[in-house]
Amino acid sequence: WQKELSEKFHIDAVVIRSGTVARLERETPPDKSIFSYYTHFVASIDFIKSERYRASFLEHCPEFAIIDEVHGAAESPGGRFSAQQKRHALVKEIAKDPERHLILLTATPHSGHDESFLSILGLLKPEFCHLNLSSLSEEERTELARCFIQRRRADVKHWLGEDTPFPERDSQEVPYEFSSAYKDFFESVYEFAHSLVRSARALTGFKKRMRFFSALALLRCIASSPAAAETALLKRTQNISQEEIPLYAEASIYDSSELEGLEDTPPVFEVEEDKTYLRRLRSFASQAQRLKGKEDKKLQKVIEIATTLLKEGFHPIIWCRYIATADYVAEEFTKALKLLFSDLHIISVTGALSEDERRLKVKELSRFQKRVLVATDCLSEGINLQEHFTAVIHYDLPWNPNRLEQREGRVDRFGQRAKKIKTILLFGRDNPVDGAVLDVLLRKAKKIHKQLGIYVPVPQDSESIMEAVFNSLFSRKEKRFIQLTLFGDPVEAFHQKWDIYAQREKESRTRFAQRAIKPEEVKKELDETDAVLGSPESVKQFLQTASQRLGFSLHKRKKDIFEIIPQELPEEVKIRLGNLPSPWRITFLSPTPEDATYIGRNHPLIETLAEYLFDAAFNNQKDIPVSRCGVIRTDEVTTRTTLLLLRLRYRLYERKDDTPNLAEETCVFGFKGIMPKIEILSPEEAYILLDTVKPIANVPLSEKQEILKETLSAIRCSLHADFLKKFVWQRAQDLSSSHKRIRRLLKKRQIKVEPYFPPDLLGVLVILPVPKGVSQNGLYLHSH
C-alpha cells in the first residue's frame, strides 16, 4: 500500500507496525500521537487493535480510511477466533462516525456464512446487519447497490471501449510417486496415525477430537517433505505444553489466516506421553532425515518442472506449507539448478522473517533475470508478486481452496505483464493424503468454478472440513472407521453444504448486480478528471515537449519504454528527485513493463518539471525555456484566433455560514476575431486547437510584438466582460453538477460553488492564418 500510494497518487505514507513504531515514536513530538502527527499512514490492523494503541488510533483516526482484506475483520461465527473478533470490534468503531469516508476492500466478501457477510455490510450501514439476503425487497436492493460494489474480472476486462489486460491462466495437475524407501516410511507413519485413530475409541469429547486432529496433522507433515517431517517429529519429543497442542493442530488442519503467527509453523500433535511412543517418533525422525535429496521423488519432480519453466522463460513461485519444507526446497534447488543455470537466483521467504525482511528479499530477488521464489503462505496475501513472477507451483496442496486461489491470485491479477501464466498442482499418485484433499476439496472447488465462473469460498465450518478429509483418508484403510458424526457420509454432507453456498453465491451475484453503475456516467466523470489532471498521453506529450525545451534526452527504446539521462535534467529538478539510475527507464502505461518506472500525472518528475517551467515562465530573465505569450502562423485556422490560459478560483460552501474552502484550476478560453467583435470557441475546440496547432511559417518579431501589445491591452480591459463572466460561471456550474452527482449517490450534503472574479491571465497564444501567396519558409518553434 505504501508503494502504491506513492507511485499512483504521490502520497508519502509511513508504515506503522511493530517493526517501525519505535522509530516513528522517536520522531514524533512528545505531545503528539503517531496517529495524529503523520497525515498519511498505512497500519497493520493487528497492530492497532492491540490494547496499547487501540484507544489512541480511534481518537485520531483520519477522516478517510481504507480497510483492505476486510473479510478478515468480519464477525467470526460463534466468536471462534478471538483475533478476528478484535478486528471486527475495531473496524466497527471506525465505521461509527457517519462523517468518515470509508472504503472496505475484499475479493471474498462472503466466506459461506451469511452472518459474517452481514457483519461486513453492517459496517456500511448498521441496518444492513438485519437484512434477509434471500428475500431482499427492491428498496433494500437499491439501497445496498449504492454502497456495495461487486465487480468481476469479466465486468472490467472490456469496459468503456478499453481493454484491461489480464493474463490467460494455464492450469495443470502433475502427479509424482513415492520412492520405495519413502513409501515404506509413509506407510509406517500411516499405520502409526491409524493407531492414534483407533486409540480414540477410549476417549470422549475434546480429547477424542484432538486425537483425530493429530492423526491428520502428522500425515500432512510427512507428505510435505522429509525436512518438515523431521522438524515436527522432533518437536513433539520435546516438552510441549498441553495448551499449545490444540492451537497448533487446528492451524495445521484448517490453513486459517486467523491463527496469527502459525501460518507455516510445524504442527504439534497429541500422543500419549509414553516412552514407547516418543521412541517411535525419534525413529521416524531419523528415517525422514535419510530420505532427503535423491529419495525424495516429490522434490525431484518439482526440480524437473521448474527446469522446464525456466527454460520457457517463466519465473516460478513454489508454494510450501511449512518453513522447514520451504528452506529444504530452496537448498536442494540451489544444489540441482545452479549447475544448469549459472545466473539463477533462488531464495526462501517464510514466516521466520519479519514483514520488512520478506519484502526486501523479494525486491532483491526481482533484480535477477532468472529467479525462483520458494515461499510459505505468509506471502499469499498483502504483497504484489505479479510484477516479477509468472508461474505458480503448489509444492504442498492447501487444505483450503480459498488459499489455493490466494496463491495463484498473487500472479494472476491486474499488473501481470505476461500474456500467459502457468499454475501447477503437484499431487502424489500413491499419497492418500493428497488423494483425500484433491477429492474432497480442490477438485470440487474447480468444478464449482467451471459451472459458475467464480470462486466460491469453502464453507468455513472447520469440523466438517476435518470430518470430510478424515473420512476420505482413513476409510481407505478401514471401512469401519470411527465416525465423528452419527449419520451420513461426511464427504457427501460437506459437498452438499458447499453446493448450497455456491448457489447462494450465484444468487448473490445476481442480487447485487451493479445496476447503480451507469457506464456513461462513469465515463463522463473519468473524461472530466482527465481534462483537469491530464491523461497518460498528455503526460507523455508534456515530458516530450519539456525535453526539447530544457535539452535533456528522452529516447524511445522499445514499445512503451523511454529512457532519460537524469544528469541532463536541470539542477533544481535533480535535487528534488534524488538518486536515479542512469539511464532511467520510464513508461506512461500501466501495467508497468519490467524494470521501468511508471510516470503518471502525480509523479515527482512531472510535478517538479511543471513547477520549474512555471517558475521560469514568470521569470523576466533572458534565454528562458518557455514563455507566457506567443504568436504563430498556421494553416489550421482561417481567422485570427486567440487562446487564453486562465486560472479560475472558487469558493466551496457546504453550509451558508461555513468558512469556504478554496479551489483553483487552469482552463483554456478561446475566441475568433479581434475584440470586441469575436466568436467564442467551445471549451473542447479550444483544448483541441491548443493541443494540435503547429506553426508552419515565421512571423517577424516586430509584428509579433505589435499583435501581442494590442491583444493584451484588449484582454486586460475584458477580464470583467460579460462573455468571460459567462464562461467562468458555466465552469462553476459544471463543477457544481459534478459534485452534486457524487454527493447525491453518497447522500452527502450538497455543495455550492462560487467563482472569484476576475480570473488570472497566465498565458496568451495568438494564432494567425497563413495569407494567400505566402510560402512556408520553415518552422517557428519558439515564441516570445
Image (cartoon, rainbow, N blue to C red):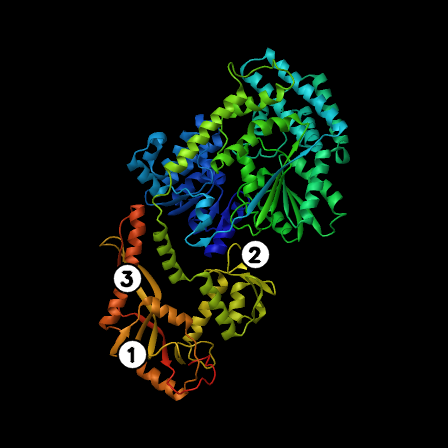
Q: Earlier in the sequence, mark 3 or mark 2?
A: 2
The residue that mark 3 highlights is: 732
Q: Residue flagged by tag 3: what amino acid is it?
A: Ala
> In this figure, what is the number of numbered marks?
3
In this rendering, the answer to whether 602 lies above or below 700 is above
Residue farthest toward the top in the current orientation of the protein: 202
SS at badge 1 = strand
SS at badge 3 = helix
The answer to whether mark 3 and mark 2 are in CB contact below 8 A is: no
The residue that mark 2 highlights is: 593
Name the image quarter holding residue 758.
bottom left
Residue at 72% x, 17% y is 276
Nearest the viewer among 36 and 399 is 399
Side of 463 relative to 119 (left or right): right
In this rendering, the answer to whether 250 lies above or below 147 is above
Disc 3 versus disc 2: distance between alpha carbons?
A: 40 Å
Q: Nearer the viewer, mark 1 or mark 2?
A: 1
Name the image quarter holding residue 525.
bottom left
The answer to whether mark 1 and mark 2 are in CB contact below 8 A is: no
Q: Position of residue 343 (x, y in %)?
A: 72, 52
SS at badge 2 = loop
The crowd level at tag 2 (other Cα within 10 Å; few <14, some 14-19, many 20+) is: many
- Return the mark for residue 673: 1
Q: Earlier in the sequence, mark 1 or mark 3?
A: 1
Disc 1 versus disc 2: distance between alpha carbons?
A: 48 Å
Q: Residue flagged by tag 1: what amino acid is it?
A: Gly
Q: Nearer the viewer, mark 3 or mark 2?
A: 2
